[in-house]
Amino acid sequence: MTGAASSASRIAADVRGGRRSAVEITREALARCDRHAELGALLYVARDTALAAASRLDARRAAGEPLGTLAGVPVVVKDALCTIDAPTTCASRILTRDGTPATGWRPPYDAEAVARLRAADAIVLGKANLDEFAMGSSTEHGAFGATHNPADPTRTAGGSSGGSAAAVASGLAPLALGSDTGGSIRQPASFTGVVGIKPTYGRVSRRGLVAFASSLDCVGPLAATVEDAALLLAVVAGHDPLDSTSLDARAGDYVAACGREVAGLRVGVPREYLETGLEPEVEASFREGLAQLGRAGCEIVDVSLPSTRLAVATYYVIAAAEASSNLARLDGVRFGLRVEPPAGGIAALHAATRSRGFGAEVKRRILLGTWVLSAGYYDAYYLRAQRARTLIREDFVRAFASVDAIAAPVSPVPAFRLGERLDDPLSMYLADALTLPPSLAGLPALSVPSRPTRPTGDRPALPVGLQLVAPPLEEERLLALAAAVERAATP
């Protein structure tokens, strides 16, 4: 982590112990935000409210009150999560009054994950950039500019949680919240060299996350280290009775899991993942990650996930269909942008507002989703995609009958250049081929940094992540494995 003061656990311990003030830490974080504004990681910096929260926290400590797990820790929140004291735009003009983030929609409540951050005494530093409505793999599709990769500013930070990942990688904050629908935490984590966790579907409440694809969306942490990611997951995980998809399951001791032994665990390598055109440097990094697990005592075995080839088509039918339904509420009537047409009534109002408010990628997915749900195509596409999703899930069930976890690359390539894939949507979609299957199956998965690529020609060394996947609700196992990889990679 470049330039950050300390790990999240150290910051919280120092604030609770009175060795540092929350105001001092917050001011330092805000100064880093100013210095690195050119990265485009943040859409909104909550300067006044962050300092006010830090001041209240210091007053409570001075009064002898107990402080929370994340006392004084600056946290960046993806701008698809509702915040009562900061605008929420989803990087879209349709949720603003005049096309700027500062005039974005002001939710009347915090997302549940954000509320849990505040209850743990974290300081919400600002709202992170993303692809519009989380639809993208490069954080280039937003209305307010792209996010640049701290490892090489000419390259993408990944997407759609690219702003959250870049904020952690550049040291703006030690922790960030992102969302992962088909890889939107894991791929940015891999591209920027941080840790990113997609929990089991339902492990973290989705209430207050602006919906993209409701059967896939997950809220999860990004952090500089596995232990910090575990610390944040421990805060936001747990049952939410107001979210019908929230699992009524006990959250684990995620921080303690980072110190568990992994010797004897069987880790499967799906042969299909190695047939997806991996760049040689990515494959070499993946092999090194497997070797690190082997040195930690894990047994590496081959497994097969034959339905992997169906994942991209399946995902882009289901996710687009759900996006079409979820975004229908943005119509120029109830909230957000309103474009009054010269004539034509309510239908013309809808058309004018949505045409101006949505970007090209969101329009593409709405049109695709509406089409696959339409009469005559529903059975041919949407129902067939749901059947294919079942096949993908059953592949994992069979694999986990013989292994404890699965290891795979996160992306076939390291971070690509900004603009390189914008005119080729299919190429952009294929970048998610290795993260989509666990999402479709609702499984917990993470990216932990592995060996970077070697510098060649005009390309510097670039981060590469190792993806680990576990059975439902086995986040503790994932964290133990990821921590073993992290320890093996530490000089």
Image (cartoon, rainbow, N blue to C red):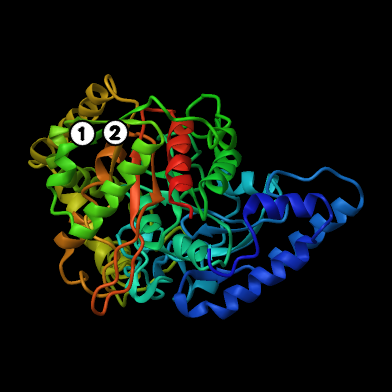
Provide the secondary structure element on which disc 2 rests. helix
Q: Which residue is mark 1?
A: 389
Q: Which residue is mark 2?
A: 441
Q: Which amino acid type is shown beneath numbered disc 2?
A: Ala
In front of the other: 422 or 456: 456
Residue at x 26%, y 79% (from the top left corner): 458
User: Could you say which is closer to the camera, residue 177 or residue 466?
Assistant: 466
Q: Amino acid at mark 1?
A: Arg
Residue 51 lies, with reference to residue 99, above or below; the image says above
Regarding residue 210, the answer to whether it shows in the image is no
Residue 215 in the image: above or below residue 455: above
Q: Is residue 440 left or right of residue 317?
A: right
Is 235 left, or right, of 61 in this rendering?
left
Residue drawn where x is 22% and y is 22% of the image: 398
122 vs 475, left or right, is right
Residue 54 position in % (x across, y down): 76, 61
Q: Earlier in the sequence, mark 2 or mark 1?
A: 1
Question: Considering depth in this image, is 245 or 379 the residue closer to the camera?
Answer: 245
Q: Quadrant of residue 350?
A: bottom left
| Residues at marks 2 and 1 touching, judged by CB atoms closer than 8 Å | yes
Q: Inspect this view and state whether residue 436 appears.
A: yes
Tell me where residue 163 sits by quadrant: bottom left
